[in-house]
Amino acid sequence: MIPGIAEDAVAYLDGTFLPLAEARVSVLDRGFIFGDGVYEVVPVYRRRPFRMAQHLARLARSLGAIRIRNPHDEAGWQALVERLIAAHPYDDQIVYLQVTRGVAKRDHAFPAGDLAPTVFGMSSPFTRPDAAQRDGGLATVSMPDERWLHCEIKSVSLLGNVLARQYAADRGVPEVVMFRDGFLSEGSSSNVWLVKDGVLRAPVKNNLILEGIRYGFIESLAAARGIRFEMRPIARAEVDAADELMLSSATKEILPIVSLDGRPVGAGRPGPVYASLRQGYDEAIG
Ligand code: PLP
């Protein structure tokens, strides 16, 4: 068995549902050889996928960006995800979907002809952020963003993100805050938000960050709650002078960042804009 994986975990692989521990992919799969594929992570609350349409739209965009044909239409993906959810005993789950270009002789260029993509899905229990994280916030460290220039693609080529996350782990904190050319980009696996004088700010949605599904969701929460939002480049000095920082992702939802490089953010505790957005988030997931 694989440590940390439930004995009864069920996976989907190329048309078949099977025990996760028995799922096998060829060593010539281009996902294994080149990281040539994309993925999605969909949170499920009380057996209902949250923002599913947005996740499927982003998956379609990622596939299009690297010219892999989308193996399913929206209804097909939905049916697949519903079966994965039903196969597991947990009410709150994290569904993982991955599509790679498929199996071919090793050659960097795309194989000729219509290669069948490898389609993989699995689900695991979703342990939501606990009270200590929600109410106490997270410590973070900063680092230069050393990733490539297509961070908008949710690619399985995650070496830059893996090394960034390990940079945090080596320093005993859960996440990094990355800067490219002196401007805020994002975390290793989260979007980063700033508050100054009551205004919520986030970096521009471009090729330098992954547009989280929570990005649009938090924008709409801010609008509904009368919080002014600005999307624009954010210089390092603004981050250092922020009243509040927070991050968002499918698994972390929205969490306050209370320190950066050992220095407190604002008052060093979660602020009022976070509290408002957190309340909106909890209400939306019911
Ligand atoms: N940015 C990066 C690099 C990520 O890996 C993630 C999610 O894992 C996000 C942002 C947040 O995206 P989402 O809200 O869709 O989880």
Image (spheres, rainbow, N blue to C red):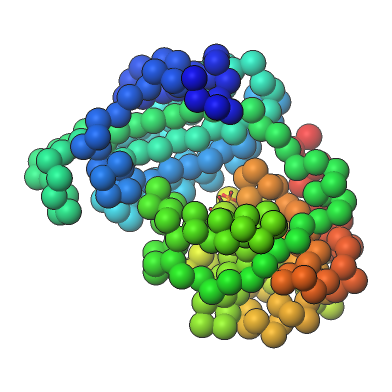
Q: Decide which of 232, 126 is in the foreground and name it.
A: 126
Residue at (42%, 56%) from the top-left corner? Answer: 159
- 160 over 244 or under it: above or below: above
Q: Quadrant of the C terminus?
A: top right
How many numbered marks have been drawn onto this rendered protein structure? Answer: 0
Residue that protrudes farthest toward the front in the picture: 170
Q: Decide which of 247, 74 is in the foreground and name it.
A: 247
Residue at (58%, 65%) from the top-left corner? Answer: 186
In the rendered view, does 154 fall on the left or right side of 119? right
- 184 over 41 or under it: above or below: below
Residue at (76%, 47%) from the top-left corner? Answer: 281
In the rendered view, does 267 fall on the left or right side of 71? right
Percent x, y of residue 173: 70, 57
- 241 over 161 or under it: above or below: below
* Residue 140 appearing in the image: yes
Percent x, y of residue 6: 58, 20
